[in-house]
């Protein structure tokens, strides 16, 4: 089966500053891929390139065999949606209005969202469990609620590939788990998800593969149990970690956890 | 937008238009205004003094219609630009249209070219200033609206200096006062011809903005985010700038510089119908039209010498806005 999303020999730099080079990655349909790496290693830049809002210096990104840069903006948005990390909203639109904006790619120039678009927006809000907030002003919501609303907006766009940039940053423990649950739900519905995170444990919690980014390239790609290792974490983050199996219910239900080693001497 | 708000927004300018026909230094009883209006519509032989007909149809009606059109233009442009630039402090002249138009008018006055040329020069230089700002922002190849605003500020400063330059060389007895009064804004010399000449620009611009108004919501999420949602932002931004510039430049070319309306009215609109541009733009049209019509009625009624409109919009508008800010604590922001 051909990959849903294929990145080959991707290279990007901001002027003199090299961000990444010779990146290769393939993500299959219905797969989650966690991109792990330290702050500033280029995860966000890569996601923006995949979304087509930044252009690679060289290399290609294909979605379903189409070069993302050759697709028209609205066609591309119909295939790839992204939830950005930094987000500020200039006007206090209400939640439903924000989610309806996700329908832009499906409307022609003279159209505004129809009743059907509103219905889709409400459906997606219900999917992330936020329908009760639909008439609230977006800017009065908590960080976790906002993240869920933005995920709803992105899936209202009905893309096949969803990119999430640090979807759990700034969120409390409960909301982190909630977001991870929703990510697993999206994948169960057949969506392809690529998310960046700097929390290794999240790689174990979502059912998919991991890619570890360091110094502008991937140092390992594969199943989290094989690539999220103590050595790789030491390389990527420069800290000592221990990775252990924890039994959830009974001995057959094991999950790996990663904890940093902090001795009193440190 | 509720039905009540909708009917209020439709009726408000019409009621004020009617009232403005009978108030003035020469008061005409409302009943007589009705008589003349209905009589004229049904082509009844006049039973009223011809003087009254001249005041209503020759003076007050064209001027009132101009005030409606200009107030509506400045306000819808302001609301669109505030959305486009994601900033509620933006006014329609952020890209230099007013300074450009001011310089055009000042230049035409300096060259003794006559009122028609003043209007044409104002329109042309207003559009030219915005074109310059737009091109300047494109030189950097950045798809950033910040760059556009910055270019606008640069161009405004440049044309502002040119206005000062024309003032220093203008004849202080005749031309300097004419330039100064033009810059303060007034509808005292306006006539039906002015209205007809700006109408095509204004109609094009307003229609264009109304068509894309929902998309301004998406654009206000930021350029990159809007693109990721499938919006082709570059042509849309250019189109919004074009529409807002044509309406503003055309308006300013007959009224002179009338500040504050384009900044304040969108806020009144947000208080009433919320931030969604789908409702905000039509609301701004109606409120802006009504507001400027009231201001113009005061300008021509309050004293024997007309108060320049540009002064009045701010002298009454600013305290009124401050009061609203205090009363609502800015919850709509």
Image (tube, coloured by chain):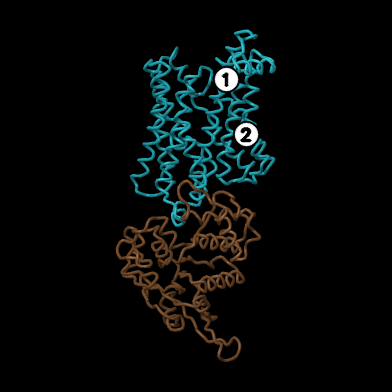
Picture layout, residue B231 above or below residue A215 = above
How far apart in space, not on screen, are marks 1 and 2 (Cα)?
18 Å
Residue contact between numbered discs 1 and 2, judged by CB atoms under 8 Å:
no
Chain designation of label 1: B
Task: Look at the numbered disc 2 and give the secondary structure of its residue.
Answer: helix
> Residue at the location (44% across, 60% down)?
A78
Pointer 2 residue? B10
What tint does the image give chain A?
A: brown
Counting from the top left corner in percent of width and height, residue A128 is at: 59, 66
Marks 1 and 2 on same chain: yes
Counting from the top left corner in percent of width and height, residue B50 is at: 60, 8
Which chain is the one coloured cyan?
B
Chain designation of label 2: B
Q: How many marks?
A: 2
Q: Quadrant of residue A221?
A: bottom left
Q: Nearer the viewer, residue B105 or B33?
A: B33
> Residue at the location (41% across, 59% down)?
A76
Counting from the top left corner in percent of width and height, residue B239 is at: 42, 41
- Crowding at mark 1 (Cα within 10 Å: few <14, some 14-19, many 20+): some
- B286 horizontally vs B174: left or right: right
Q: Nearer the viewer, residue B292 or A110?
A: A110
Counting from the top left corner in percent of width and height, residue A200 is at: 49, 76
- Crowding at mark 2 (Cα within 10 Å: few <14, some 14-19, many 20+): some
Task: Look at the numbered disc 1 and give the secondary structure of its residue.
Answer: helix
Picture layout, residue B299 above or below residue A94 = above
Badge 1 or badge 2: first in the primary sequence: 2
Q: Quadrant of residue A15?
A: bottom left
Residue B61: mark in rendering: 1
Does residue A254 appear in this view?
yes
Q: Nearer the viewer, residue B305 or B288?
A: B288
Q: Quadrant of residue B320?
A: top right
């Amino acid at each position: 089966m051909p990959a849903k999303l294929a990145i080959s020999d991707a290279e990007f730099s901001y002027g003199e500053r090299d961000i990444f080079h010779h990146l290769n990655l393939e993500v299959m349909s219905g797969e989650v891929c966690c991109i792990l790496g330290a702050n500033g290693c280029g995860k966000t830049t890569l996601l923006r390139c995949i979304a087509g809002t930044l252009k690679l210096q060289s290399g290609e990104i294909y979605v379903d065999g189409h070069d993302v840069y050759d697709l028209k903006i609205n066609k591309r948005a119909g295939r790839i949606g992204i939830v950005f990390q930094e987000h500020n909203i200039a006007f206090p639109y209400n939640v439903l209005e924000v989610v309806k904006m996700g329908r832009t790619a499906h409307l022609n120039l003279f159209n505004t969202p129809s009743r059907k678009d509103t219905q889709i927006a409400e459906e997606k809000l219900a999917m992330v469990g936020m329908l009760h907030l639909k008439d609230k002003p977006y800017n009065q919501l908590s960080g976790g609620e906002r993240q869920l609303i933005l995920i709803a907006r992105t899936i209202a766009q009905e893309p096949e590939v969803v990119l999430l940039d640090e979807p759990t940053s700034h969120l409390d423990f409960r909301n982190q788990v909630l977001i991870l649950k929703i990510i697993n739900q999206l994948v169960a519905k057949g969506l392809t998800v690529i998310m960046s995170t700097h929390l290794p444990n999240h790689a174990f919690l979502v059912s998919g593969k991991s890619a570890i980014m360091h110094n502008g390239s991937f140092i390992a790609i594969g199943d989290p149990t094989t690539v999220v290792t103590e050595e790789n974490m030491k390389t990527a983050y420069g800290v000592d970690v221990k990775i252990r199996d924890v039994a959830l219910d009974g001995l057959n239900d094991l999950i790996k956890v990663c904890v940093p080693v902090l001795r009193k001497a440190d | 937008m509720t039905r009540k708000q909708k009917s209020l927004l439709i009726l408000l300018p019409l009621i004020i238009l009617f009232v403005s026909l009978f108030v003035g230094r020469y008061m005409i009883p409302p009943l007589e205004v009705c008589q003349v209006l209905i009589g004229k519509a049904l082509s009844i032989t006049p039973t009223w003094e011809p003087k009254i007909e001249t005041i209503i149809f020759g003076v007050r009606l064209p001027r009132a219609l101009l005030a409606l059109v200009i107030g509506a233009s400045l306000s819808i442009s302001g609301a669109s630009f505030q959305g486009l630039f994601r900033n509620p402090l933006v006014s329609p002249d952020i890209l230099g249209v007013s300074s450009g138009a001011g310089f055009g008018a000042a230049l035409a006055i300096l060259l003794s070219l006559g009122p028609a040329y003043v209007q044409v020069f104002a329109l042309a230089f207003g559009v030219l200033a915005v074109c310059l700002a737009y091109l300047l922002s494109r030189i950097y190849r950045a798809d950033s609206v910040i760059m556009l605003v910055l270019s606008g500020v640069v161009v405004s400063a440049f044309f502002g200096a040119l206005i000062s330059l024309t003032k220093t060389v203008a004849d202080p007895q005749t031309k300097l006062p004419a330039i100064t009064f033009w810059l303060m804004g007034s509808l005292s010399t306006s006539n039906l011809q002015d209205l007809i000449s700006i109408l095509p620009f204004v109609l094009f611009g307003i229609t264009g903005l109304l068509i894309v108004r929902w998309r301004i919501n998406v654009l206000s999420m930021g350029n990159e985010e809007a693109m990721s949602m499938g919006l082709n932002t570059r042509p849309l931004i250019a189109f919004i700038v074009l529409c807002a510039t044509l309406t503003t430049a055309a308006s300013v070319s007959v009224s002179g510089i009338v500040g504050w309306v384009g900044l304040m009215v969108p806020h009144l609109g947000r208080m009433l119908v919320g931030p969604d541009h789908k409702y905000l733009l039509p609301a701004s049209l109606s409120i802006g039209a009504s507001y400027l019509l009231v201001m113009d009625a005061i300008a021509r009624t309050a004293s024997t010498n007309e108060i320049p409109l540009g002064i009045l919009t701010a002298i009454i508008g600013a305290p009124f806005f401050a009061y609203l800010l205090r009363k609502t604590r800015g919850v709509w922001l």
